[in-house]
Amino acid sequence: MIEIKNISKSYIKGDKIIDNMNLEIKDGEIMGFLGPNGAGKTTVIKMITGILEIDSGDILIDGDSIKNNPYKAKEKLGLNSDSPDMFLNLKGIEYLNFIADIYKVGTEERIKKIKELSKKFDMELALNEKIESYSHGMRQKIMIIGVLLHNPKNWILDEPITGLDPKAIYDLKTMMREYAQQGNVVFFSTHILEVAENLCDRVAIINKGKILFVGNINELKSKMKENNSLEDLFMEIIEND
Amino acid sequence: MIKNIMLLTKSSTLDYIKNFNLIDKKTKKLNKRSIYVWMIIIVALAMAFLSNYILGILRDYGQTEVFLDNIFAYMTLIMFMQVIILSMNILYFSKDIEYFLPLPIKPQELLLSKTNTILNVLYTTEIIFMLIPLILYGMSTTAGFTYYCTIFLVLLLLPIFPTILVSIIALIIMKFVKRIKNKNRFQTMITSFFMIIIMLIETFLIKWIMSDNVDYGQIDINLKTISQNINNTMVIVNPLIDILKQENIFGNLLKILALYIVMYGVLIYMGKRIYIKNILKTNTYSKSKSRKKINWESKCRQRSIIKSYMENDLKGLFRSAICFMQTVYPVCLATVMIVILSISFKYSLMQNNKEMFDLLNGLNLTIEGVAIILGVLQVLFSISNISISAISRQGKNAVFMKYIPISLYKQFILKNLLQVILNTIISIIVIVLSKVLFPNISIVQMLCLFVITTVVSILNSYLMLIVDIKRPILDWDTEIEVLKQNGNKIFQYVWTIIVVILLMYIAKAFKNINLYLAVLITFLIFAILLFIADKYVRVQIKRNKLFKNVI
């Protein structure tokens, strides 16, 4: 479970990028994080994962504070950042092994997982090549495999759909659903509203550092004009802000 | 054409200068709050002090002119090495080439903008290391106004020769390369090939000078012979020195300009015909695929976090040719050169000057000797850029450090290890070399030296890593931005100057006390500094401040 409690963040004094935000993502839930460009989605994800310091408030990962007990909290997290252009000098298999070592995944378990996930994402033949030679989509896939190697209780994805082919999007959505059904948290930011509509148990809409709405699509529809698409509802909320 | 070249050059140059934050945007005056301004002032003062010191000695011998010969000889050699290390990467392998290829830019325009990027790096080297010494030389020889005007002309012209020459050679080499299977290995091999040639030439020169009937007691004659022989091999150096000495200014200027027109002509002609074709050969690498089977049991064995972390850092360093050549290569090269020069010097003394040879063999280690060895090692440590670029080299990967479950302090220590290991190897080589040169140094003294150099090396690595973590360059398109155009390097120069001055003071202050006591005090000074640096790191990490800019 991820508990975001009254967090605020500002880069320039007095100009809050995230303003007293509260949010709770329960175990077994897929939550979509929606908002226009510059709304603060990536900033929140960076604070949850310990990349950015929290000015005030706290974030708890399964009860452990990312501020006060960061290493314990980070063990329960897996992050797919918005840029998959990482570790380009390593071969796919080297990268996966490195991640498995960092998260102390045993030899047998990692072999089983790598085989299983690379087959699922059609990456088996590319594992022995440098990530540098991968396409954008392949880089996304290898990063996703890397994150899932240690079975994090909380899986966070920043714009995960970008660059993936339709089959990979389908596979990823299925995997996210399966992962949540196992009692884990899946929290992802996206611009693609259809994905959020079809996949999420709940969505959180953020604009100018404030949460404007948290709930499922039906609640959102009943709150706003009924029978609208998520796109219409999203625009209505953002414009009303 | 000129407009496009200027545009391409301007964008890279402005980016470069912007990093230093030298001018205050509001007042348009010198930014006194920029740490780089103060660092540049410190380096300038140190260069002034050093130049003044050397000029004073040469004046006593009545050989002030030797200063000019020497500074040009060694700077030209340094520039050649810099160009050799940079050229292949900037011309063929930098990432921004991919962005430029689809643009409607002519091959010769792209090529000239790339050579201008190399020139920018060399001009910075000149400003740091040559400008102040040349001004001081003018003051010491009471040169007229024309001398100061010609300084800028000479500094403008000097780097063009190595840049264009090496670029033409690089074009020719690439013309004969069919396909590059591994661009990193290729760059390292070509650079090594260039370097071996340079080293062979140098060794040949040294041998030639040593075998000459030189009186080793006359330092001035020796220095003059070495520098003049180097300058004679570089076509433009002597005419440039003559311009500074105001001997036939226009004649020499015309000679150089004519040479440059021919060189640029050749470069543009060749660039037009083969540059883009050459670049396209380098892009085939990413498309080649080797579908080898994975040996799961050996490849996927679980390792300790430390081993895995270190191995990953090591792969990052050695698999990127430009990183390797900018961080490990120069210090290895400098160490090899020191070893070759020292041993050939001692060997030639044994052959030609028995008296001097016996004098060296009879010398005992003093605190001055310790200070000199530590000073040489500190200079060697400063050539290696592993720590000062440890975070920046990783670019977008750097943020990974912050979300993995390993304490930042532990990662800080791990990031230091590669630099410390390399420094330790260099220390051992230099200490053993000292023993070869001065056989009276005992094993205990060698051990003492090793302990102090280890502390100095760790301290140097710690400080440079702190600088890189505090001021990382993470958003880059070319590795050159991280390493060669990295303003943080000035911190390394300043620290080296501080250490050298401290060692000079130690040598003077503890001259008359017992050697081992003096060594112990020296050790304690550096150990206390290291303790303070470590404490600072711990406190900063605890307050979430050290890695604040790694995002």
Image (cartoon, rainbow, N blue to C red):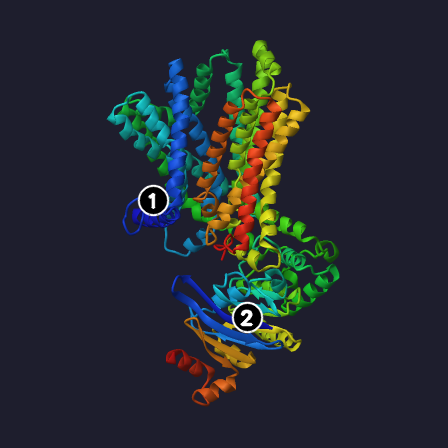
Q: Foreground residue, B225 or B474?
A: B474
> Three-letter amino acid code at disc 1?
Lys
Q: SS of the residue at dot 1?
A: loop
Q: Residue A36 location in percent, x, y?
A: 43, 72
Q: Is residue B284 visible?
A: no
Left or right: where B444 falls relative to B235: right
- Residue A165: mark in rendering: 2
Hey, what amino acid is under mark 2?
A: Asp
Q: Residue at x 40, y 14 (%)?
A: B61
Q: Residue at x 49, y 39 (%)?
A: B85
Q: Is residue A83 left or right of residue A77?
A: left
Q: Position of residue B244 (x, y in %)?
A: 31, 25
> Is any part of residue B374 visible from this angle?
yes
* Residue carrying label 1: B32
| Chain identity of mark 2 | A
- The chain identifier of the residue carrying mark 1 reads B
Q: Are marks 2 and 1 on the same chain?
A: no
Q: Where residue B510 appears, x then y in whole percent?
A: 54, 24
Q: In this rendering, which labeled residue sits more in front, label 2 or label 1?
A: 1
| Residue density around tag 2, few if under 14, some if 14–19, many if 20 or more, within 10 Å | few
Please tell me how many numbered marks the rendered image carries.
2
Coordinates of residue A238 in the picture (x, y in percent): 40, 78
Residue lying at the far left in this picture: please name it. B145
